[in-house]
Image (spheres, rainbow, N blue to C red):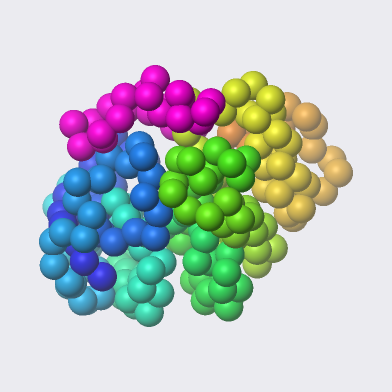
Amino acid sequence: MKYYSFRYNDNWYGGIATAYCSECNLNCIYCYSHNKRDTGRDRSAREVADKLMKLASKHGVDKCRISGGECTLDMDHLLEVIRIIMDESDLEFWMETNGIIIGKNPEFVEKFAEFPKDRLYVTVSLKHIEAESFAKLTGAPKGDVEYSKLAVERLVKKDVTTRIAFMTDWYDDKEHAKLIDWAIITLIMNTGWYDGTKSEDEATDHLLTLLDFEEFRKYKSVPLKKQEILDILKS
């Protein structure tokens, strides 16, 4: 897997050591690492894990992650990074993925389920819940949106700690409501957390801990402005 940067971020997850990979299976029109695609150099799992552990120790944080591109493109590499982190540190690993490869390969879910659920957190970035909008935003086939959703459902069924991230700017009210309804069923109703005794307020509070509501931020590396992206979605 190629990486273009390793650095500490204090504005995510309360502080986290991050390895930025440059390979991806999508071409999102709002991607902040658009200009980093396929840059950097190949790194071994040992190199990546060591750099993450060193960064986390230096800044006194208990979390690390791979971000930037799509970490599941080299699953053997990813699993080895996680194993080293789990075996040689007390760090939490916050995995960020679009979920497509996981959705297409259910056997990978079994691998993630082997790690401690209180140390591996998988965040699936759902680019959009509607197939047409998903394709316009990512350049991927419309049907791939179902693999992202399937990844979430399979991870939850295997009791892997799972969260959903989505860009609120690309959803209208109706689409947002549809996403939340699906998230409630997937992340709450179909898990052991819901035992019939929880109140609606408790369910809402719990759901909020499992969702990342992201807003578009225009980086210099993003070629399009927010309105231009919205126009594409409406076209």
Left or right: 136 with respect to 182? left
Rendered residue at 51%/46% (across/down): 135
Percent x, y of residue 200: 78, 29
Q: Is residue 151 visible?
A: yes
Question: Residue lying farthest right?
Answer: 196
The residue nearer to you, when weighing 167 against 109, is: 167
Rendered residue at 31%/24% (across/down): 225
On whether residue 105 falls in the magenta region, the answer is no
On whether residue 225 falls in the magenta region, the answer is yes
Up the image or down, 62 lies above or below 175; here it is below
Percent x, y of residue 192: 74, 55
Q: Is residue 54 visible?
A: no
Rendered residue at 45%/40% (across/down): 137
The residue nearer to you, when weighing 62 against 48, is: 48
The residue nearer to you, when weighing 172 against 188, is: 172
Rendered residue at 44%/49% (across/down): 139
Residue 71 image-quadrant placement: bottom left
Q: Give the range drawn in magenta.
A: 210-235
Percent x, y of residue 80: 34, 77
Percent x, y of residue 115: 49, 71
Up the image or down, 27 lies above or below 156; here it is above
State how many labels appear.
0
Left or right: 221 with respect to 181? left
Quadrant holding the N terminus: bottom left
The residue nearer to you, when weighing 152 against 81, is: 152
Up the image or down, 235 lies above or below 33; here it is above
